[in-house]
Amino acid sequence: MATGLLVYSQNTMNSSLNIESNFNHRLILDNVANTISEVDSNGEFYSKYLKLPVTGKNYVLTLEKNKLTIEYDNKKGEQYVPFIDSYSTYKMYPGRIYTIEKTHEGKILIT
């Protein structure tokens, strides 16, 4: 019986950690999407700095056209950023600082 309780509690803890990880990565995705939308809505030459947080899991964010994707631990989350016109496909990594700006041509540039 004790072994069964131990296995159950371990599975419950692992499940809680997975939920927390999924939630944290979803927050990162939402924050980046909101920052891109903010820059886009503020007009030409507006820019904003964004530092991606370091988590216990390695992840990659990709902006392609108007779709933002986060990938980590063989999991994937997507969010559409309406009306975004980016110069190219961008990949963003944890711990790095990015400048997101809207150019005079109305396109989003990430450096």
Image: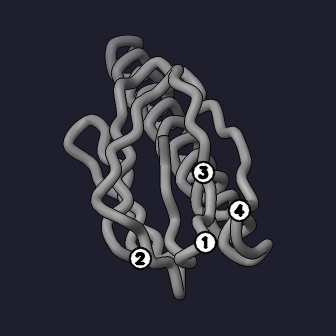
Name the element at disc 4: loop
Residue annotated with mark 2: 66
Instruction: Name the residue type under label 3.
Output: Ile
Q: Residue at x 70, y 71 (%)?
A: 44
For discs 3 and 1, the disc positioned in front in the rendered view:
1
Q: Find residue 45 and name its label.
A: 4
Name the element at disc 2: loop
Query: Mark 1 and 4 residues: CB-CB less than 8 Å, in contact?
Result: yes
Asked whether 14 or 58 is in front, the reply is: 58
Name the element at disc 1: loop
Measure the alpha-carbon separation of dots 1 and 4.
Answer: 6 Å
Label 1 environment density (alpha carbons within 10 Å; few <14, some 14–19, many ≥20): few
Q: Position of residue 99 (x, y in %)?
A: 60, 41
Sooner in the amino-acid sequence: mark 4 or mark 3: 4
Asked whether 94 or 37 is in front, the reply is: 37
Residue annotated with mark 1: 104
Asked whether 93 or 100 is in front, the reply is: 100
Instruction: Name the residue type under label 1.
Output: His
Q: Position of residue 71 (x, y in %)?
A: 30, 46
Sooner in the amino-acid sequence: mark 2 or mark 1: 2
Residue annotated with mark 3: 100
Asked whether 40 or 104 is in front, the reply is: 104
